[in-house]
Every structure is written in structure tokens, then in C-alpha cells.
Image: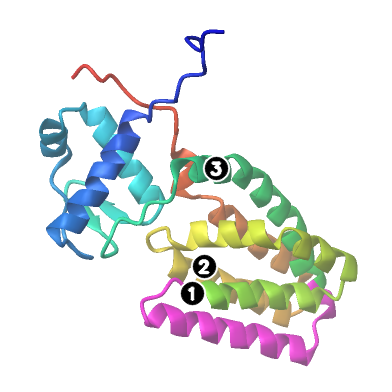
Amino acid sequence: MTDALRPMAARPRMYEQVLDRLRSYVAEGGLSAGDRLPPERDLAARLGVSRASVKQAIVVLEVQGLVEVRHGGGTYLVRDSLDIEPVERLVERRRRLPDVLEAREALETKLAELAAERRTDEDLAALRFSLAKMAGEIEEGKHGVEGDRLFHAAVTAAAHSSILAEFMRSIADQITESRNESLRQPGRPSRSLAQHRAILDAIAAQRPGQAAAAMRRHVRTVAKVRLLDWDPEEEGDESG
């Protein structure tokens, strides 16, 4: 039996090869957060690939929160290295994220409504603590992830619905993914904090409809992430 027709190894997409080169460039060049990468045109010329492949690689880095693209001002490192997440993992997260966000909107809107009807003084104290935690994290230059987690957990607790709480626990890992994805969007932590305050105000005032509307607006903001704009199959013309 000949093995001439054995399965062929998949060739990495060109932009994935560009990612590997950029990671090495940053490491070997000793670049750190705040440093600027060469312009896309220069990178394409030096690597011998099309600008489309370089642009797609930059998009992947931007999606992962590793670089900041300033329109008309270049691309800057956000961290001291390009610790790139495997593209396959990004693709899988992109595939399931819309379903997670849809479930979050359905569940958390109802939870906010119930919280406005059923909250106790202890529940309000937990909500206010979570906002103070998130504000402190943001002041330290962090994304406010732990404060965000505490806030949504406090809303769930304030709803006093064991079944809805169980549903939330069942998708906890996916919610964590969506939270991290959202909060690394530029300017998002402070915006989320303001939206949390609006939700808390409605819950404290015992206005169920207002609380539900505020939560719906918030989760729809969470859904606006760079990852969902990324087309992992887009490669461009490698001829030039």
C-alpha cells in the first residue's frame, strides 16, 4: 500500500505566519508596552507578504487586546510581549459568543427586573461594594473584571430566584469569557461602570421596568466586541 495519498498537513494561513514573526520581532527587539510597531506597509515589504496578511495579523492582535490601533497614528503594544492565543481557540470563542450573549440578555434582564422587586438592604450593600471594587480596579489601570463579576453575581443574588441562579451558574465559564472580551475593549471599563450604576439606581428605587431596560442596554454594549467583527477566513490577495 502506498502512502502517497495520506492526508496533507494544513498550511498555516499567511497571517498566522506573520503573527509568529511579529511575536519574535517584539521579543528579540526588547519592545515593551507603549512601543510602536512598524507601519503595515513596511512590515509587508520586510516580510515579503501582502498588506492584507499584515492587516489581518494586526486585527488578531487587536482582538486579543495585545495592541492598540490608533487610526492615523499607528499600532502600539499594550503589553510587553505578544503572548498570542492560538487562532483556533479564538475562532471557537467567536463561534459561541453570540449564543452566550443572547442567553445573558434573556437571563440578566429578568434577573435585574426581579432584583428591583425583591432586593434587601443586604443585597444593596453587596451591589454597592461591587461597584466600589470595580471603580478601584479601574483607577489602578485594570479592567475591573473582579468588580464586574461581583456586580452581576450580586444582581443574581438580589433576584432571589434559585432556578435562574442555577441557569447562570451553568454558563459561568462562558460568561467569564464574554466579560473578559468586553472589558478589554478600549474605554469599555468606565462605560460598564456607569451602566452598572444606572442598574443599581433602578434596583435601589425598586423600578423593575427601568432596571430591566438598563440591564438590556448594558448587555447589548457587552456584545459590541472587536472579536465579532473579525473574519478568520479573510486572507486577501497574496500576490501583492
Mark 1 residue crowding within 10 angstroms, few (<14) / some (14–19) / many (20+): many
Q: Are marks 3 and 1 in contact (CB under 8 Å)?
A: no
Q: The residue under label 3 is which amino acid type?
A: Arg
Q: Residue at x 65, y 56 (%)?
A: 174
In this picture, is 178 found above or below 228?
A: below
Image quadrant of residue 177? Answer: bottom right
Of discs 3 and 1, which sits in the foreground?
3
Q: Earlier in the sequence, mark 2 or mark 1?
A: 1
Q: Earlier in the sequence, mark 3 or mark 2?
A: 3
Q: Are marks 2 and 1 in contact (CB under 8 Å)?
A: yes
Mark 3 residue crowding within 10 angstroms, few (<14) / some (14–19) / many (20+): some
Q: Residue at x 31, y 29 (%)?
A: 14
Which residue corresponds to mark 2? 192
Instruction: In this rendered view, identify the residue nearer to me: 76 or 218.
Output: 76
Label 3 – label 1 distance at C-alpha: 22 Å
Q: Which mark is residue 144?
A: 1
Image quadrant of residue 76? Answer: bottom left
Q: Is residue 177 magenta?
A: no
Overall secondary structure of the magenta stretch? helix
Q: Which residues are magenta?
A: 115-144
Instruction: In this rendered view, identify the residue nearer to me: 170 or 111.
Output: 170
Which residue corresponds to mark 3? 94
Q: Which mark is residue 95?
A: none
Q: The residue under label 2 is which amino acid type?
A: Ser
Q: Position of residue 202 (x, y in %)?
A: 69, 75
Asked which secondary structure carries label 3, the reply is: helix
Asked which secondary structure carries label 1, the reply is: loop
Name the quarter where the N terminus is drawn. Answer: top right
Q: Position of residue 135 (x, y in %)?
A: 47, 82
